[in-house]
Image (cartoon, rainbow, N blue to C red):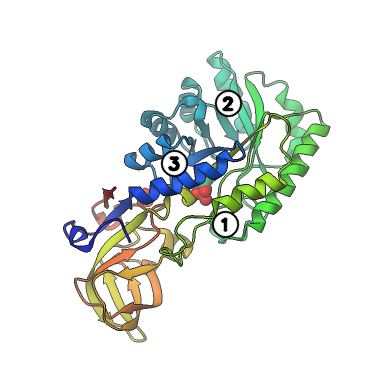
Amino acid sequence: MLGLHLPEIQQHATPFYLYDLGLLRQTLATARAEAEKYGYHVHYALKANANAPILVEVLAHGFGADCVSGNEVQCALDAGFAPEHVVFAGVGKSDAEINLALDNNIFCFNCESSQELEVIHELAAAKGKVAQVALRINPNVDAYTHKHITTGLEENKFGINMWELEVLLPQLAQWTNIKLIGLHFHIGSQITDLRAFENLCARVNEIQQWFEDKGFTFPHLNVGGGLGVDYKHPDTNTIADFANYFAIFHKLLDKREGQQVHFELGRALVAACGTLISKVLYMKHGQKTNFVILDAGMTELMRPALYQAYHHIDNLTSTLPAKTYDVVGPICESTDSFSKAIQLPETKRGDLMAIRTAGAYGEVMANQYNLRNLVQAVYVN
Ligand SMILES: *Cc1c(COP(=O)(O)O)cnc(C)c1O
C-alpha cells in the first residue's frame, strides 16, 4: 500500500515522510502520456515538493519547472532543469530574484502587475538583455475550491485584472527590454470540479480574442495548474484524472496555429506518493471524544491547520473493531488537529499511523515551531 512493509516502516524513527517513488513514476508517466497526446508542455510546480529525489524523477519524465521564488529557480537549475524549461511566477518577485532569473536566461517570467513589468524591463536593460514575459491575467473564474486556495477571483491578490490593461498595454511599447510572449492563468488549487477548467477555457478564449482585437498575438498560452486529487480514497483513486483534464483543454481551448500550450501541475503529480508516518504517543478521554495524540503535528503537515484540509488516516498496527476518535498533534495550538470524529480500529499508545496523500504541500511547509526537529524523509522504490 505504501511501497514498504510494516517491519521496514517500524525500523525508522517517527515522525517521517515516506515517499513511494514507484507510484510517483507511475503518476508522472500517466500525466506525461496524456499531455503528449496534444503536444502540451507541463511544468512541475516545485513549491508542492522540492525534495531532490522527487525532482530527479520529475526531470527524468521530461517536465519543465514552475518556480515561485529565486531559490526555487536556483533549485530547479541545480536539479538539472534546462533554463529554457523554467518559468517564474509570483506576485512579489524581489530585484535579487529577478536578477538571478535574468542571469540564468530562464524561459519566461509570469508577471502579475504593471509595476513588476517595469522593474523587469529596467533590470533587464541594465544587463543589456531582453526578458521574455507572460501576463498573468486574473480571469475572475471561480475554482470551486477552498477559499484559501482560490487565486483567480478579482478579490485575490494574484494576476492583472482586465480593467488594468487599458493603461498597461500602451506602456508595454516603451519597455523595450521585455518581450511579451504569452498569457498566463492560474485559478486555484485542489480543483476537483472540472467545470472550473471548462469555465477557464471559455474565459481564456475571450481574453485571447480581446488581445487579438488590439493587435496582440501570443506564441504561448499557460493555463496554470490546480488539478485536484482524491484525499478521501487514496487506495482506490490514486492517480488523478489526467486524461479528462487535458481532454477538456483540447476540446475547449481555442489554440491558435503553432501556439504552444503550457500547464503547471504540482499537487496532482506528487500528493499521492507521500505519506506521513507517525506514532501514537498518548490516548486521552476528552469530554465528548477520545483523542489520539500523535508525535506528528502541524509542524510536519500544516494543511489541516492552514486550510481545514482532510487527509485519510490509517492505523497500520491495529485490526481491532473501529471506534470514533479525534486525531491531534502535540503542538501547543488548538488548530493542531488532523481529523475530528473519524472511525479507526481501536487505537493504543505505540500504534503506527499513516496520514495519506501528503506528498504535496506537506514536507515543504514543515517548520520547527516549538523548537521541534525538522521532519525526515524516507524513499522507497
Ligand atoms: C501553486 C501553483 C501552481 C500549482 O498548483 P497545483 O494546485 O499544485 O497544481 C501552478 N501555478 C502557479 C502560478 C502556482 O502558484
Badge 2 crowding class, 10 Å Cα cut-off, few under 14, some 14 to 19, many 20 or more, is: many
Mark 1 CB near ligand 1 (8 Å cut) = yes
Distance CA(mark 1)–CA(mark 3): 18 Å
- Single out the mark in the foreground, 2 or 1: 1
Residue for badge 2: 120
Query: Mark 2 belongs to which amino acid?
Result: Ile
Query: Mark 1 belongs to which amino acid?
Result: Ile
Quarter of the image where the N terminus is located: bottom left
Residue 41, placed above or below residue 364: above
The residue tagged with tag 3: helix, strand or loop? helix
**The image quarter in which residue 279 lies:** bottom left
Residue for badge 3: 46
In the image, is 170 to the left or to the right of 79? right
Residue 311, placed above or below residue 209: below
Badge 1 crowding class, 10 Å Cα cut-off, few under 14, some 14 to 19, many 20 or more, is: many
Badge 3 crowding class, 10 Å Cα cut-off, few under 14, some 14 to 19, many 20 or more, is: many
Residue for badge 1: 191
